Image (cartoon, rainbow, N blue to C red):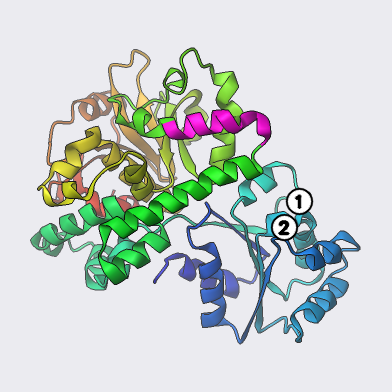
Amino acid sequence: MYRVAIEKLIKWKSSKHRKPLIIEGARQVGKTWLMKEFGRQEYRDTVYINFDSNSAMAELFAADLNTERLIMGLELYVGRKIDPDNSLLIFDEVQEVPRALTSLKYFYENAPRYHIVCAGSLLGIALHRGTSFPVGKVDFLKLYPLSYKEFLMATGNERFAQLMNNQDFQMITSFKQTYIDLLKQYYFVGGMPEAVQSFVENKDFNEVREIQSRILAAYEQDFSKHAPNEIVPRLRMLWNSIPSQLAKENKKFIYGLVREGARAKEYETAIMWLSDCGLVHKVSRVNQAGIPLRAYEDLKAFKLFLVDVGLLGCMAGLRQRVLIEGNKLFVEFKGALTEQYVCQQLKTVEDLGVYYYTNDRGSCEVDFIVDTGEQIVPVEVKAEANLRAKSLKTYYEKFSPEISVRASMWDYKKEDWLLNLPLYAIDQIKTVT
C-alpha cells in the first residue's frame, strides 16, 4: 500500500535540520505501518519499541534523561547496538510514557545524529495536556486516512492517479466514468487502511462495513478508557449526532441537535477532545476574505466532519445498494457524503487553511473557503452535475477572488472567474487555481 507520507519521511531523513519527528493521527489510520515501512525501505536496521504497558520503558525514562544512558538502556532492551546513522528508532504509543516525549528535546540538543520517529493514537491529547517538551525541538507530520488518490493506487489504478498528477484534464475527461465509479467505491470504503486492504483483497462490501463497525466500536471504547469521566456521556452524544448534523441543509454545528437545551459551554471540552484525537475535523466560519483567513475566524460557528467518509457512511447506515443505483449515492444523505469527502481531501493538501463562509445575514453560504497562502479560493460543493452556484456568484460579486471553484461531477472547465473542478480531482486545487 502506497502512502504519500513516505515521501515526506524521506525528505525528513535527508534534511540537515532534522529533529525527532512526531506523527499525529487518529487510531488505525496506519501510523505504525508507515513507520515500519519507512524503516524497511530506508534504513539498515529498525528499532521498534511499543510503550503501551511497557514497564521497562516507563522505568528507563522515569530516571535521568541523559541521552547516552537512554541509548544504552534501549540497546540492552532490544539486544543489539543502535547505529545513529543507519538505525531508525521508532517510539510507538509514546503518549503512554510522557517522559519519553520530554526526552526528544534532549535527543535533539545532545544527540541529533539519531533518527527518531514517534506516534501514538491519543498523542494529540497528551500534547495538549502540557507534556513537557519545548516547541521547536520536534518536527510534526499529520497522517490521515488514505486519500482518493491513494485509494486509486491501492486498488491497482496507479496510472489514473498519475494522470491526475499530470493534470491532463482532456485525457481525464475521456476516462471520467472510471474515476466516478472508483469515487463511488471510495465513498463507501473510505480510507481507513484495514478497510481498503480488505476491499482490495476480497471486494466484499459487507466485510468492509464490519471492519468500519469494529473501528467505530474501538473509538467508543477509547472514550471510556481515556477521556475524563465527566465528559464521556457528552462525548458519546456529540459523536453520535455528527451524521444528523451533516445531513442538514445548513451544516453548521447545532448544540440543540446533540441534546435539547444543550449549550456550547457543556460541549467545548468534548469537541476539543475529539479534535485532539484526530477523530473530527473542526471547520470554522469566516465572514471576510482577507489573508490570512485565520484572522477572520469566527470561533463560535463551525462544522464538524468525521475523520473518514467510509466511517460516516457506516454510522449513517448507508447500504451498498446505493453503489449500483446510478448517481443516487451522490444525492442520498443530502450531499453530506460529498461535503465530508471534499473536506477530507482538502485536509490532506499541505499548507492549506480550510474554512467556510456565511455572510452576517446567513443568506449566502459557501461550503469551503481555502487559504493557499497566496490567495483565498471559495469552493462550492455540488453532489451531482448541478451547475447552479448562486452563493458562489454572490461571494464573487462581493470579494472578487481571482478564481472561484465549483466542485461537481461535471467535467473540468475554466471560465473567466469560475473553475469547474471534478470532485475526483479536488486535491489538485492548490496547483490548478
Helix, strand or loop: magenta stretch: helix
Any part of residue 351 in sight: no
Which residues lie in the magenta part? 228-240
Residue 365: % across, % down: 30, 25
**8 or 131, nearer to the observer:** 131
Residue 116: % across, % down: 67, 69
Q: Quadrant of residue 224?
A: top right
For the N terminus, which image quadrant?
A: bottom left
Identified at 27% across, 25% down, the residue is: 249
Residue labelled with disc 1: 134
Residue 88: % across, % down: 64, 77
Q: Which amino acid does label 1 sit on?
A: Pro
The circle on residue 137 is: 2
Q: In this view, does 133 lie above or below 17?
A: above
Residue 181 located left or right of residue 211: left
Residue 79 located left or right of residue 394: right
**404 or 76, nearer to the observer:** 76
**295 or 310, nearer to the observer:** 310
Identified at 76% across, 54% down, the residue is: 98
Secondary-structure class at tag 1: loop
